[in-house]
Image (tube, rainbow, N blue to C red):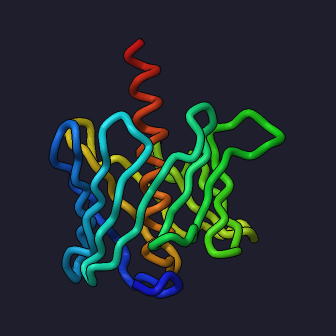
Amino acid sequence: MKNKEELKVDVIEVTVTGTFKTAHVFNAELGILGVLTLKSGKGEGSFVGADDSLLAFNKTSIWKSNYELLQGNEVIASASPPKKKITRAFNLDFEGEIYTLSPGGSKRRSWTIKSSPGQAICEFLPRGALKRGALIWIQSEIPLALLVFGYCLVLKRWQEESAAAAS
């Protein structure tokens, strides 16, 4: 997978199986794009693309919401909350380009990745009340690695929301 290679699809449905170790299958009209495997309760996982490319997702701090995406030993993306205000959003640095991932969009619990000029690139929505996973609406071409990284971050925020609601 070339990091700058961009997806040219409209919708991706992510389906989830497993309990303690979950598999998140990225399904598009053209077929399976890849599978993300996450360890429950940990901030880490790996994505294997349809072309056998490998990405690793890691939480870099126990106390802070800082994450990174690696391809091999190279960090290709990092995410951290904005420094100046208390928010659930993330600032993303993907290969030197800056994006924001913030809650809000067309529906409740949705999240949107925007470019630095503020253009919406894609929106993540839960699949439904009783279904795990997400629907990802792509509004502008996006590299698959950035899409996977965004999904991992949104999933972490959804898990935090669920844990807070349960307590």
Q: Where is residue 139 in the image (x, y as percent from the top left)?
A: 49, 73
Q: Residue at x 61, y 59 (%)?
A: 78
Identify which residue, 2 or 123, lies in the foreground.
2
**On the picture, is 116 further left or further right than 134?**
right
- Residue 137 position by quadrant: bottom left
Q: Where is residue 156 in the image (x, y as percent from the top left)?
A: 45, 41
Q: Where is residue 36 in the image (x, y as percent from the top left)?
A: 30, 60
**On the picture, is 89 further left or further right than 22?**
right
Is residue 61 positioned above or below 134 on the image? above
Name of the residue lying farthest toward the left: 18
Q: Which residue is drawn at 33% across and 78% down?
A: 53
**On the picture, is 108 further left or further right than 40?**
right
Is residue 47 positioned above or below 18 on the image? below
- Residue 167 position by quadrant: top left
Identify which residue, 46 or 146, lies in the foreground.
46
Name of the residue lying farthest toward the front: 73
Count of numbered labels shown in the rendering: 0
Q: Position of residue 55 (x, y in %)?
A: 40, 68
Q: Residue at x 22, y 55 (%)?
A: 15
Q: Quadrant of the N terminus?
A: bottom left
Q: Residue at x 27, y 66 (%)?
A: 26
Is residue 90 positioned above or below 119 on the image? above
Name of the residue lying farthest toward the top: 167
Is residue 82 positioned above or below 25 on the image? above
**On the picture, is 83 further left or further right than 64?**
right
